[in-house]
Image: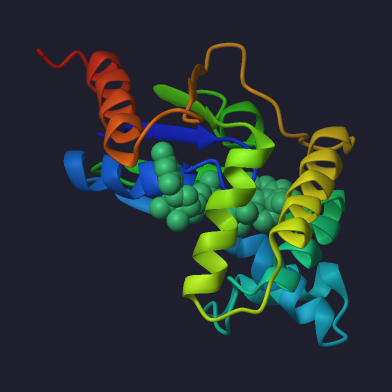
């Protein structure tokens, strides 16, 4: 039987970290949907048409350094386009419906992609905390960035993602909000697992 966990939230809130841990705990598959938009964004940086790139992506593997800082901005720009989003919907829904359970993280999973998801989480934190985390992450990966530029990038993407007309970033009405500003990774993961276990009807 399928069981879908939808995890949404703004940039660098800890969605991926929490999603991977939830998937490992319950034995579910995990899809980071941001990588789809990043892959389209990376193709557009090379001169491709966004909609064609989204359609082509569905027939190939994701490749390249999709975590590079410029790619996130390019992703957020292509993600405004309803035709780009439409090209990526079926793949995400099929993934969500797979037998054995699935965790999808992104911006519109609980609101648009899987409104029927059995468990919905909205993972967030203050922009300053999120930018600090992303700054450390990018430095560790060898990218040359400044804290100020990373904070500006996070705020710009938050605004674009929240204000777009199609599938804007917002918590689903039935999502459980987890603010990780003052939480360690272990605390955030434990809180998420507790929510999913409760929705599954597991005994504590
Ligand atoms: O997927 P998303 O962009 O929401 O965030 P992430 O990639 O899971 O997390 C961004 C960074 O914050 C990673 O380096 C995590 O290890 C870190 N993090 C943290 O320090 N504390 C948390 N409670 C969650 C994540
Ligand atoms: O890791 P981080 O949270 O910084 O970004 P991401 O999840 O990789 O997403 C990159 C960009 O893709 C976001 O800023 C959104 O504009 C877009 N995105 C989206 O529109 N819908 C999704 N389901 C996932 C990502």
Pick the front one: 49 or 141: 141
Q: Position of residue 64 (x, y in %)?
A: 58, 84
Residue depicted at 55% across the width and 83% down the height: 63
Q: How is the structure coloured here? A: rainbow
Residue lying at the far left of the rendered structure: 203
Evaluate whether residue 36 shows in this view. Answer: yes
Pick the front one: 18 or 88: 18
Q: Quadrant of the N terminus?
A: top left
Give the answer, above or below, for where 158 lies relative to 200.
below
Evaluate whether residue 96 shows in this view. Answer: no
Give the answer, above or below, for where 174 lies relative to 149.
above
Q: Quadrant of residue 102?
A: top left
In the image, is 53 to the left or to the right of 105?
A: right
Q: Quadrant of residue 74?
A: bottom right
Q: Position of residue 56 (x, y in %)?
A: 69, 77
Q: Position of residue 168 (x, y in %)?
A: 78, 34
Q: Quadrant of the C terminus?
A: top left
Q: Position of residue 8 (x, y in %)?
A: 56, 35
Residue depicted at 71% across the width and 66% down the height: 146
In the image, is 87 to the left or to the right of 121?
A: right
Residue depicted at 49% across the width and 76% down the height: 141
In the image, is 125 to the left or to the right of 30?
A: right
Residue lying at the far front of the rendered structure: 147
């Amino acid at each position: 039987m399928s069981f879908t966990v939808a995890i949404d939230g703004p940039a660098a809130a800890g969605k991926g970290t929490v999603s991977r841990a939830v998937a490992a705990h319950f034995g579910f598959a995990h899809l980071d949907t941001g990588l789809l938009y990043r892959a389209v964004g990376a193709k557009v940086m090379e001169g491709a048409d966004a909609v064609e790139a989204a359609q082509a992506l569905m027939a190939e593997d994701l490749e390249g350094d999709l975590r590079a800082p410029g790619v996130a901005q390019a992703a957020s720009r292509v993600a405004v386009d309803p035709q780009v989003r439409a090209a990526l919907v079926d793949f995400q829904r099929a993934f969500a419906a797979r037998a054995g359970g699935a965790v999808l993280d992104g911006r519109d999973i609980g609101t648009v992609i899987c409104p029927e998801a059995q468990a919905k989480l909205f993972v967030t934190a203050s922009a300053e905390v999120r930018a600090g985390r992303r700054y450390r992450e990018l430095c560790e990966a060898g990218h040359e960035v400044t804290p100020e530029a990373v904070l500006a990038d996070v705020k710009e993407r938050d605004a674009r993602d929240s204000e777009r007309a199609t599938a804007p970033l917002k918590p689903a009405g039935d999502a459980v909000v987890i603010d990780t500003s003052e939480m360690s990774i272990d605390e955030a993961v434990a809180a998420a697992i507790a929510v999913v276990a409760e929705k599954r009807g597991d005994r504590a």
